[in-house]
Image (cartoon, grey):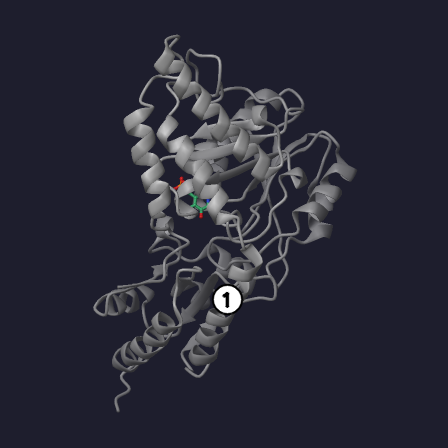
Amino acid sequence: MIYLDYSATTPINYEVLDTYNRTSKDFFGNPNSLHELGIKTKNLMNSATKQIAEILNVHETEITYTSGATNSNNIALIGIAMSHHKKGKHIITSKLEHPSIYAICDYLESIGFEISYVKNDKEGLIDFEDLKSLIRPDTILVSICSVNSETGVRQPLKMIRQIIKKENADTVLHSDMTQGIGKVAVNLHDVDLATFTAHKIYGPKGIGILYKNNNINIAPILYGSGKSNMLNPGTPAVPLIVSLSKALRLATIDLEKRERFIERLNLKIVDALTKYEGVMINKTKYSIPHILNISLRNIKAETFLHALEEYEVYVSSNTACASGNLSTSVLAIYNDKVRASSTLRISLSHLTTTDEVNKFISYFDEVYRKLSGLHG
Ligand code: PLP
């Protein structure tokens, strides 16, 4: 198998899986229980939280465990809308977000919030002037991802924050950092709220994080008992939490070295695919190398994806969550419906080998020739 879909999800790291198994076996107590096993489990959970906070350079009380990025995005966006609606009902997001952000914004719009979509330039960067002009006294929230899941375009969140806070110091900045964390260095202090999920960083599925700066008030959208994790109450999933802390630690080492290696693989693929007349490379100078998007002229991306599957090569068309639709991100960057109608995402990892990339290039060639009617 040649797995080139690491941005959809990653295989769990065996050390993380081992942590999960051991914690499930030896620390199965409820951390809310008062007996020894409960306390032992709670202590383990607290030390995992401490480690996560240290890695992210935030305070332990700023971390909420969720079931994943979609869950975190809901708690963040709806929570801010509910807590800030008396100040205003205006929310800004970009055209380069994950579908879960659009689904939440559509819901908020249906209950009376106003959503504006900030423009981006031809490199996929948020248009600062447009952002500035959109911010109003009643703008309560801006949500902009750190890295776009389809094209890998990375946003300068620090500058975005400066623009927002200068126009309206009360506007909250949320960032979906799901495709950033574990791939590139991110700074949670650039934002007020941040979202990510363990299954994109070689951790287990079913656990994510919402970072919330302690100075930000947010209304809970879920209610329950307990004294911790109040934005997402219920019995804490300790084995998942401990695994997440391990996955985060392992995913954030050697980031630059890994990025340089992935960049070489990315360039090798770009170099090989540019020679096809029917292939367009959707890469801008702000795309991180882990995510490589291409458009196919005259071949349906899904047909291509399934043809590659015959060689046990796995890639994505659009995002895994939105397959079959126009690529909103490619459309936002290139303003070309044809280009956005048939896109493939090849996503790379430090686990990808040069041999896999060479084989991918050769299988790609075979599939391309077959599907575009070229032979020989
Ligand atoms: N946000 C981004 C940027 C993503 O890439 C994804 C997954 O594709 C999600 C959110 C959804 O994450 P989860 O599956 O943890 O809900």
Looking at this view, name the residue that lies furthest to the top.
Answer: 34
Crowdedness near tag 1: few (<14), some (14–19) or many (≥20) residues, C-alpha within 10 Å = some
Q: Position of residue 47 (x, y in %)?
A: 50, 27
Q: Position of residue 151 (x, y in %)?
A: 50, 60
The N terminus - image quarter: bottom left
The answer to whether residue 67 shows anywhere in this view is no
Looking at this view, name the residue that lies furthest to the left.
Answer: 310
Q: From what the image shows, is residue 214 above or below residue 173?
A: above
Q: Position of residue 173 (x, y in %)?
A: 64, 36
Q: Which residue corresponds to the image point at 35% horizontal and 59% vertical from the top-left?
A: 316
Closer to the camera, 97 or 211? 211
Closer to the camera, 110 or 339? 339
Q: Which residue corresponds to the image point at 59% horizontal and 59% vertical from the top-left?
A: 124
**Dot 1 lies on which element?**
helix
Q: Which residue corresponds to the image point at 43% horizontal and 15% vertical from the top-left?
A: 223
Tell whether 321 sits left or right of 90. left
Q: Amino acid at mark 1?
A: Phe
The answer to whether residue 170 shows anywhere in this view is yes
Give the quadrant of residue 364: bottom left
**Where ligand 1 lies, by image quadrant?**
top left
Q: From what the image shows, is residue 23 above or below residue 203?
A: above
Q: Position of residue 6 (x, y in %)?
A: 39, 55
Give the quadrant of residue 314: bottom left
The C terminus - image quarter: bottom left
Looking at this view, name the residue that lies furthest to the right.
Answer: 166
Q: Which residue corresponds to the image point at 54% horizontal and 55% vertical from the top-left?
A: 254
Q: Mark 1 — residue?
A: 261
